[in-house]
């Protein structure tokens, strides 16, 4: 969905490096989410934000942090990347009060 | 713990046949369910959703059935086409608007020409 963009699309980094994944949306949605997807598994929620001042941990937040710089931007950071954080990362948005989420194209992160 | 899962990891069907993808959920408090389609290299795309006060909902070539008694959800695709080949995820949520979605592990649908 071109309304939700993620950068970079692919990244290879080394263990211990700090990495930031960025998400931008033009949908005007208040809510934004970060998920990770591992092979053979569904998406698991890392963090979510209901507005700029409301950030919440998901089921697998350890090792990650987020920043909601503006309504349209939600970034995910790995302060010290480790190999088991190798995964596909998705950003999503939704309208306040609804459940349907709109996903970005994903970022493939490899930690060596 | 509570989980959402799928019965079959891979489903292969002939073009033109109907497809049925199943999903079992264990959280009886869930009141909203949604199906997503994920094509290779892309993010999940919304297909259809259903609330717990319904047992059936139809879209264009797709139907979702909800059986709350056995906590089962299914996605039916009519006249399956090659473009339907993808991984399909079910997801659930409860307390609509206050919790994010919990996803199942996905079923890969392969459409044979």
Image (cartoon, helix red, strand yellow):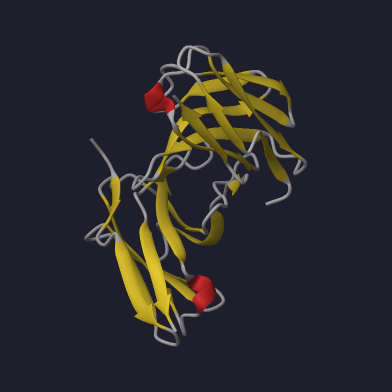
Q: Residue at x 51, y 56 (%)?
A: B40
Q: Is residue A28 left or right of residue B94?
A: right
Q: Residue at x 29, y 59 (%)?
A: B9
Q: Quadrant of the image for the C terminus of chain A?
A: top left
Vertical placement of residue B84 versus A86, above or below = below
Q: Is residue A5 visible?
A: yes
Q: Residue at x 26, y 39 (%)?
A: B2
Q: Nearer the viewer, residue A27 or A64?
A: A64
Vertical placement of residue A45 versus B87, above or below = above
Query: Can you give x and y, in whole percent of width and height, for residue B45 in the image?
Result: 56, 56
Which picture quadrant has residue A94? top right
Q: Is residue A2 left or right of residue A11?
A: right
Vertical placement of residue B26 versus A58, above or below = below
Query: Can you give x and y, in whole percent of width and height, for residue B51 in the image?
Result: 45, 57
Q: Is residue A56 left or right of residue B1?
A: right
Q: Is residue B99 visible?
A: no
Which picture quadrant has residue B111? bottom left
Which picture quadrant has residue B21? bottom left
Vertical placement of residue B62 versus A73, above or below = below
Q: Nearer the viewer, residue A98 or A12?
A: A12
Q: Residue at x 42, y 19 (%)?
A: A82
């Amino acid at each position: 969905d071109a309304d939700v963009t993620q950068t970079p699309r692919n990244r290879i980094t080394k263990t211990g490096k700090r990495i930031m994944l960025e998400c931008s949306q033009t949908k005007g949605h208040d809510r934004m989410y970060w998920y990770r997807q591992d092979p053979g598994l569904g998406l698991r929620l890392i963090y979510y934000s209901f507005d700029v001042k409301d950030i919440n941990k998901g089921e697998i937040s350890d090792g990650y942090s987020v920043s909601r710089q503006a309504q349209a931007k939600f970034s995910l950071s790995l302060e010290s990347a480790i190999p088991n954080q190798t995964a596909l990362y998705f950003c999503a948005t939704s309208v306040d009060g609804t459940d349907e989420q709109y996903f970005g194209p994903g970022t493939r992160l490899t930690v060596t | 713990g509570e989980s959402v899962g799928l019965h079959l990891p891979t489903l292969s069907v002939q073009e033109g046949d109907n497809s049925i993808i199943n999903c079992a959920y264990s959280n009886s408090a869930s009141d909203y369910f949604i199906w997503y389609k994920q094509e290779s290299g892309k993010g999940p795309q919304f297909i259809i959703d259903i609330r717990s006060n319904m047992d059936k909902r139809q879209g264009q070539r797709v139907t979702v059935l909800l059986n709350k008694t056995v906590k089962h959800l299914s996605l039916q695709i009519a006249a399956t086409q090659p473009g339907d080949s993808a991984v399909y995820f079910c997801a659930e949520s409860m307390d609509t608007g206050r919790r994010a979605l919990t996803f199942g592990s996905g079923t890969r649908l392969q459409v044979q020409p």
